Amino acid sequence: MGLIVQKFGGSSVADAEGMKRVANRIVAAKRDGNQVVVVVSAMGDTTDELIDLANAVTPIPQGRELDMLLTAGERISMALLAMAINNLGFEALSFTGSQAGVITYSVHGKARSIDVTPGRIREAIDSGAIAIVAGFQGISQDTKDVTTLGRGGSDTTAVALAAALDADVCEIYTDVDGVFSADPRAVPAARKLKTVTYDEMLELAASGAKVLHLRCVEYARRYNLPIHVRSSFSTNEGTWVVKDHPEGGAMEQAIISGIAHDKSEAKITIVGVPDRTGVAARIFQAIADADINIDMIVQNVSAAATGLTDISFTLPKAEGAAATAILQKLQGEVGFASIQYDDQIGKLSLVGAGMRSHPGVTATFFGALSDAGVNIEMISTSEIRISIICRQADLERGAKAAHTAFELDADQNEAVVYGGTGR
Ligand code: ASP
Ligand code: MG
């Protein structure tokens, strides 16, 4: 018996039936003698619908007002869920992010949560109630305005609250049974992972796996808080996100834990860049000044005859127009020939702590891609990850081929997608 923080995503509370199902789940944990704090997301695709609505009244919604609008989605969920729990004869109290003490910086749309002071939540659970908290939102320390934590931010609310309350576990309920060796929507043979380490999960989340919000994993790692990712539609044991794979598991531990794919990036190539000291610094400083995050970079050896080289880098598609505009302004000063923009790329990443101690991972990976007819355009690696860029049209074929090559395919279909529209 202890303190559990449970988080339910939008697909788990998509309608009244979902609310009631989740309420039963919560009450069961309470009946087992636990103190229960629940973080809830907006119902179904509400957040996307609210964004569409904002864009229908103005092309550029103001950050402050957009945050005010979007946070309404989670408030609807929290109140309905509290009512559903009350209806089962249990006391439940709902709280907005600000009431729950989620304090952030004042950047709208992607505020970083800096501090959680959950005094009222502690009071509520100590009095025997179940506390329901609106995910994804906080209040800015300086402006006192309502802020949001970025898309998918309810996971982060849950883990931050769990850390502040010193909870025993944070359970993240979603529409699949846990973290899979690949996205089951693209690789049907994906298998459920029993455990995944914080480091692996961080790499997977940063490489496009959508199951957990990146910031939430950073938080969990910092506080060494175990996360149990599982489905609200089944009672199956899910995936534990922990510091290390369990003892003795090392032998059976696969070299590759998971494969992630990402279609959200674009590639910019700057053609004919003079090969001079300071040129790359000048280019990337200008990009950084605009707060644009880049991912992979490739620079070729300059051609001896011309002294010119090409530099390619990838970045989120959403920042593509801004980056291109910045580079165009720089063209005269730096003196490169042209800029090419390509948004038809895909990124495929293999992640696994086992790759530290196993040679040949790259060879197997590239062999599988070549057999599948997938051409590699860029490569980047970390200690436990290899990523490549290829044509977007080849991405899912490459993911399936790599999954098979590393013997990750499940014998029978393990990956049930219970809900969600994949929006
Ligand atoms: N409702 C928000 C979103 O859709 C936050 C979340 O679901 O975690 O991004
Ligand atoms: Mg959502």
Image (cartoon, rainbow, N blue to C red):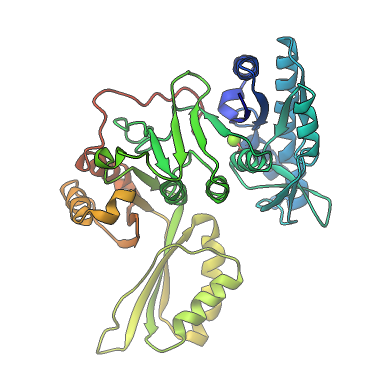
In the picture, measured across the screen, residue 367 lies left or right of residue 248, that is left
Q: From the top left corner, tell me how far across and down residue 293 is, in percent.
A: 53, 63
In the picture, measured across the screen, residue 188 lies left or right of residue 204, that is left
Q: Nearer the viewer, residue 269 or 380?
A: 380
**Number of numbered discs overlaid on the protein picture:** 0
Residue at the image position 60 percent from the left and 72 percent from the top = 289
Q: From the top left corner, tell me how far across and down residue 380 is, in percent.
A: 34, 62
Q: Tell me, yes or no, if residue 229 can be seen here.
A: yes
Q: Tell me, yes or no, if residue 328 can be seen here.
A: no
Q: Note whether 51 is above or below 232 in the view shown.
A: below
Q: Nearer the viewer, residue 54 or 245?
A: 245
Which quadrant of the picture is home to ligand 2? top right
Quadrant of the rendered image containing residue 268: bottom left
Residue at the image position 30 percent from the left and 83 percent from the top = 302
Residue at the image position 29 percent from the left and 47 percent from the top = 394
Q: From the top left corner, tell me how far across and down residue 124 is, in percent.
A: 79, 28
Q: Note whether 372 is above or below 132 in the view shown.
A: below
Q: From the top left corner, tell me how far across and down residue 359 is, in percent.
A: 20, 56
Q: Nearer the viewer, residue 129 or 48?
A: 129
Quadrant of the rendered image containing residue 335: bottom left
In the picture, measured across the screen, residue 223 lies left or right of residue 245, that is right
